[in-house]
Amino acid sequence: MINRKKFLSTSLKGIAAGATSLSLFPKVIARPSPMNTIKGPMDGLRRLSGFQELRRNVGLFTGRGGTIGWLYNSEALVAIDTQFPDTAETFINGLTERGASSMDLLVNSHHHNDHTAGNGVFAPFAQHIIAHENVPTYQRNSNQDSDAKPITADQRFSSKWSGDFGDETLHLMHYGAAHTGGDTISFFEKAQVAHLGDLVFNRAYPYIDPSSGASVQNWVRVLNTIVEELPKDTIYIFGHGHPEFGITGTWEDINRKKAFLEELLTLGNEAIMAGKSKEEFAQMEVIPGFEEFAAPGWRLPLYYNLNIVYDELRSTS
Ligand SMILES: [Zn+2]
């Protein structure tokens, strides 16, 4: 079912060409394809637990950890992220039950274990793993205390990469440091669906990883670039989300996240200018105007965000 030759030729082309300019993306508002007109192997996936199609053979899988994205058409199979070994197995089993025998490409959106710990389960099934060039090093550094060596990408890119998979084209973009120093945006051009990894924790306090190159100030610029460059009709898959607001959304959800980060920076700058200590600043219990970010049961508290923003502003001012 999977056309391996086709993948090899397209992947080599993608690596050699390095990039497809985003200016080629149509800036038109495309109408979603009616789901019931799409016939392909994923028709059956729709009935399996955890799998959800979004548009034109592109969908998501939820188990435990960062949301997995997938493309499954009659010629190719691609996945983004692998969660943990147990849910990775559930995901792969779901695909093999629908007739898949191998995966053309696995993308790691970034190195965090809730997105890559299942790589070992995917590895025998996936022909290639691709990630931003900083990811393997971050992955090894963050698993130094673990007995098992992490499975890392065999293909890397620095800013842009593209490949054709059946009748779909996948673009990978890295717009600079944000949640980590190795975040990838995976954009399916025909379906107009983008997987953002952890660039958006939808309406929840985000994890920020300065020890792996994160920058809150640049994160704002990265979110701005996504909204400017991708078509308005794009459906976005988020790594994590508030139970009420979900793990998919639109450019408006990205703008909401951007506004939250901007407010953290504004408040942090004001606190520093007023001579407040980090401890005083981190006592805020909610950001006024962003009360919905206090997601019930969310394990990352606001003070954690405030500490990191304060440190970043002090080190860059
Ligand atoms: Zn993450």
Image (spheres, rainbow, N blue to C red):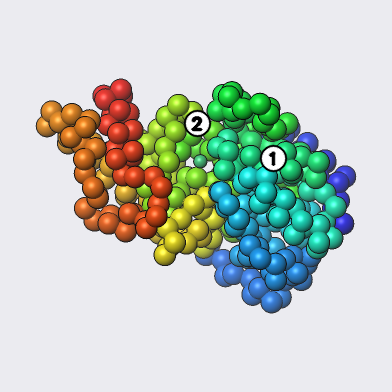
Quadrant of the image occupied by residue 139: top right
Which amino acid type is shown beneath numbered disc 2?
A: Gly
Marks 2 and 1, how far apart in space? Answer: 20 Å
Q: Where the C terminus falls, by quadrant?
A: top left
Secondary structure of the residue carrying numbered label 2: loop
Residue reaching furthest to the bottom: 36
Query: x, y percentage for residue 168?
Result: 71, 55
Which amino acid type is shown beneath numbered disc 1?
A: Asn
In percent of the image, x 51 and y 60: which residue is there?
248
Query: x, y percentage for residue 5?
Result: 87, 45
Question: Which residue lies under the disc numbered 2?
Answer: 181
User: In front here: 119 or 314?
Assistant: 119
Q: Where the N terminus falls, by quadrant?
A: bottom right
Q: Is residue 26 above or below residue 172?
A: below
Give the number of marks. 2
Mark 2 crowd level (few <14, some 14–19, many ≥20, 10 Å Cα): many
Question: Which residue lies under the disc numbered 1?
Answer: 119
In percent of the image, x 33 and y 38: which residue is there?
304
Seen in the image, is 135 located left or right of residue 94? left
Mark 1 crowd level (few <14, some 14–19, many ≥20, 10 Å Cα): many
Seen in the image, is 165 located left or right of residue 236? right
For marks 2 and 1 on the same chain, the one whose residue lies earlier in the sequence: 1
In percent of the image, x 18 and y 29: which residue is there?
277
Query: x, y percentage for residue 19?
Result: 64, 38
Instruction: Judge: label 2 CB < 8 Å from ligand 1.
Output: no
Secondary structure of the residue carrying numbered label 1: helix
User: In front here: 87 or 80?
Assistant: 87
